[in-house]
Amino acid sequence: MKLNKTVLALAISAVILSGCSDDELDTSLTDGTQNAASGINDASTSGFNNGSGLSGSEMSGSGMYPNAGIGPEFSDPSNPLSKSTIYFMLDSSQIQDDFVPVIAAHARYLMAHPDQHVVMEGHGDERGSREYNIALGEQRAKSVASMMKVQGVADDQLNVVSYGEEKPASFEHDEASWELNRRVELVYQGK
């Protein structure tokens, strides 16, 4: 029951943070190709996991367990720490409910290991201008970092970087590939 209350508190925190951010994404950076009016992944086609049918645990552009060298918990598929990629909807930096427990597990790990550092690498799909995707990738990484900070992770343990569309997980040009590319990867830097 306590875990359910914790997850609920984290979800509420995420909603509040996403609605109150003074780091809002500058929509003037968009070239107009990513809005719903374009017909790309609008309400009729959007929905997390809709295109590929993959869940967050199955979708990974960096290998099955990229942080496995840190400890066995990072390669145990039943442990949320084994999930190091957070996926996002089109044009969104809002954290999906499926990934709140994953971020919470990483936050608990970081608080228990203050000498550990993580880089949140933000990414976007190929649609939109380069500048827009860099900004969106950064906003996504900041969303994950903010959720971790709310849970007590020290600011100096977190580093945010954005690659925009420059490091795709998939090089195809379809919805399933774009879903894989809209992500934040958690990359631990070791002790």
Image (tube, helix red, strand yellow):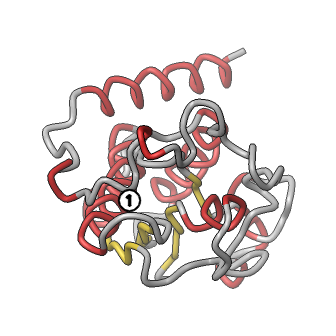
Specify whether 187 is left or right of 27.
Answer: right
* Number of residue marks: 1
Q: Is 183 left, or right, of 154 in this rendering?
A: right
Q: Callout 1, which amino acid? A: Ala
The residue where tag 1 is placed is: 141
| Residue displayed at 63% across by 48% down | 102
Res 109 seen here: yes
Instruction: Tell me where residue 42 appears, x and y as whole percent.
Output: 54, 37
Q: Report the side of 52 relative to 95 (left or right).
A: right
Where 30 falls versus 104 (above or below)? below
The quadrant in which residue 156 appears is: bottom left
Question: For this view, does 180 lie left or right of residue 185?
Answer: right
Image vertical order of residue 191 relative to residue 143, above or below: below
Front one among 121 and 108? 121
Quadrant showing the N terminus: top right
Residue 174: percent from the left, percent from the top? 67, 65
Nearest the viewer among 171 and 31 is 31
Is 130 or 143 nearer to us in this picture? 130
Q: Which residue is pictured at 71% across the width and 75% down the height?
A: 71
Residue 129, given in percent of the width and then of the height, sits at 30, 69
Mark 1 neighbour density, 10 Å: few (under 14) some (14–19) many (20 or more): many
Q: Residue at x 19, y 59 (%)?
A: 29
Q: Residue at x 84, y 64 (%)?
A: 76
Give the residue at the far front of this rendering: 38
> Is 164 rendered above or below residue 166?
above
Describe the element under mark 1 as helix, strand or loop: helix
Q: Does residue 158 show up?
A: no
